[in-house]
Image (tube, coloured by chain):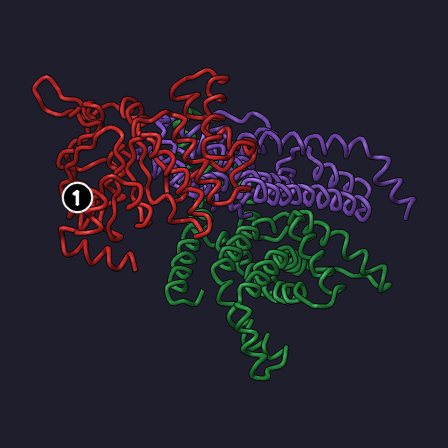
Amino acid sequence: MDRPILMVRNLTKSFSNVPVLKGISLDLQKGAVLGVIGGSGSGKSTFLRCLNYIERPTSGEVYLEGQPIGFQTGPSGLHVPDTASSINRMRAQFGMVFQQYNLWPHMTVLQNVIEAPLHVKRLPRKQAVEIARAHLAKVNMLGKENEYPARLSGGQQQRVAIARALAMTPKIMLFDEATSALDPELTGEVLTVMRSLAAEGATMIIVTHEMAFVRDVADRILFFHDGRIEDDAPAAQMFATPNSERCRQFLARALQ
Amino acid sequence: MLDNLQRNVLSNLDLLLTGLLTTIQVCTQAFLLATVVGLAACLIRLYVPALKYAAIAYIEFCRSTPMVVQLLWVNYVWPEVFGFPGTVIGAGVIALALQSSGYLAETFRSGIEAINKGHREAAMALGLSPARTMRRIVLPQVVLEMAPSLINQLAVVLKSSTLVSVIAVPDLMFQALRLVDRSLEPIEILSSVAILYIAVITSVSLISKLISDHFRDKYGLSIKQ
Amino acid sequence: MTTLQALGEALNPDLFWEYRNVLLSGFSYNLLIFALSAVGATVIGMLIGIARLSSNWAVRATATSYAEIFRNTPEYVLLVWAYYVLPIIIGRITGTNVRFDPITVAVASLAVAYSGYFSETFRAGILAVPKANIEAGMSVGMSGWMILRRLVIPQAVRRMLPESLNQYISLFKSTSIVSLIAIEDLMYRVSMITMEESRPLPLYTWAAIVFCTAIVLLTQVADRLSARWRRAGLA
């Protein structure tokens, strides 16, 4: 088996001494689609946000393709925190999609998508625009390049946000409850986009409440409870015969 | 009535016009100075912990001292203690700017704090540096959010600027009062000047409101006036 | 004088303290004018605020124009106009020789100037009263006037309290302009003493310090009160 694309070792996070993540370890293979489920407050969103260092983990390590995120190993073998600029560079290798879309309201759709390719990757404008159009086409938003986000529906905004993340050609896509803020009739269009990404072989971690979707799309599912991974199984097995009683109850309630 | 208007106002139009130009000059300079100083005070308050309380003290002093008091203080005390300003116009500009910079610092702060945390996180997630995030994501939104308040503050500066005549800055108000002194016929002069002030200040406020409506519509920002 | 000497002179409180009684009696004018104009501004503002919500088009337009005009009028211009021009106009209309005492002019000008702001606060307060409240009043057969007096105004007043406090503080600051029509308030006396003693540095500096301290303290009190009202669910 290849080296895992993502390795997480004993990750913890506390907010003002309240532990939210209590030691998460994980290996993820390239091309895998990982679903993360669990009740609110179980730590699943914090986990996602610690991976790309939007939240600074309290302890533990994250490696992307063998490269440590957020620290370097010093000559003595001790970990020294990484510089802010190198954290920024590493961070861009994760694409993140937020619950609230977080499109920048003062920029048009196109400006939102080309901002990071232009100024983080320093691509020439022409190339950045080409890439942006290709990804906007993929999420079916071509033709709306010059609209401001305020004029778009929630589903359209979220699709643009996905294109914005894809435009950086990230190694892993992180979805943080990407459909939770959407009206039910708009979730479908976003899930379709995510489904086609999975089919193309993208590596994805999907935090979600959409049980039917995650069962369908994910290869493997983690069930979070109280800051720990309580259950970890292939999707079909998780839904058919969950290992933990808590997970069984959670699924029973969620699938009602 | 028309005779009086002719004698008191129209025949002195050149004098009133130079007064108006002085008013415009003083207000423009004070407003620009206040914007720069106010932004600096706000950024220091938010991002320089060592100087936070100095910034708060400055902002509170500016907001809490009446305009007339600041005007006389700057005009009579500053030249001795700080060696400037050398002219009454300079004193007028500084006093007006002091007053407004305190308010603007608070306006900027509420603007920065109102920026959705998620917008910053999205920039972080894409690898934008903090400096670039500030410049490209936060400040443009602050400017859009603040544009109506900024323009409104210009209206406030215009209003307060009438007081600089007290230290003999030859602004519109000063020239009007001088004409009244000379002619002892205040009705036409003071009424015309009052109407002019009200018209200009009302237009500035109106522009502020229109811009705020437009931005709310275009960018969906939650602009409050 | 070196900079340091000048600074020492500016911060020397002796002269200010020596004239404390004169200055304090000047300050009492600020307080008196503040109290009277605050009452005036509140009453006028309340009436205009209600009129701005009238169902009668003409009443509404008049009240709205009144508020817009006076919100955009410099206080000093209003004060000077009321001091020099108004008596002449009234005199011509009534055919008598009218003279206004400066304090009356100051109180009236400040009251009118601030009534514009108060009307806006009051209007917003009334609009913030939930419509369901009014409908509930109607459903138990209360008249329009009764609904206004018993349901809307008490709630609106509570909602407008915090903002009104800020406006009262602004009004208090504005009382310093009355010296410009020769009312012997604090700043007027500061200027007089300065002329007599030829020592402007300490007087103007301490006048600024005293005003600033007083207003910072008042603002603190206002903020505390507002926070308490908010906690108590009143505002």
Q: Position of residue C74 (x, y in %)?
A: 65, 47
In the structure shown, which secondary structural element does the residue marked by tag 1 occupy? strand
Q: State the image coordinates of residue C41 (x, y, percent, origin top left).
A: 61, 62
The subunit carrying tag 1 is A
| Quadrant in the picture for residue A14 | top left
Q: Nearer the viewer, residue B116 or B167?
A: B116
Compared across the picture, whether C32 is left or right of C231 comes to right
Q: Position of residue B197 (x, y in %)?
A: 71, 43
Look at the image and tell me whether residue A67 can be seen.
Answer: yes
Question: What residue is rendered at 84% in x and 41% in y?
Answer: B8
The colour chain A appears in is red
The answer to whether residue C155 is above or below residue A105 is below
* Chain assigned green: C
Question: Which residue reaches farthest left?
Answer: A76
A242 or A133: nearer the viewer: A242
For this orientation, the residue located farthest to the bottom is C141
| Image-based side of C224 in relation to C34, left or right | left
Quadrant of the image occupied by residue A70: top left
The amino acid sitting under disc 1 is Asp
Q: Is residue C200 visible?
A: no
Which residue has dot 1 on it?
A232
**Chain the render paints purple:** B
Above or below for A124 versus C52: above
Residue ID at (77%, 57%): C87
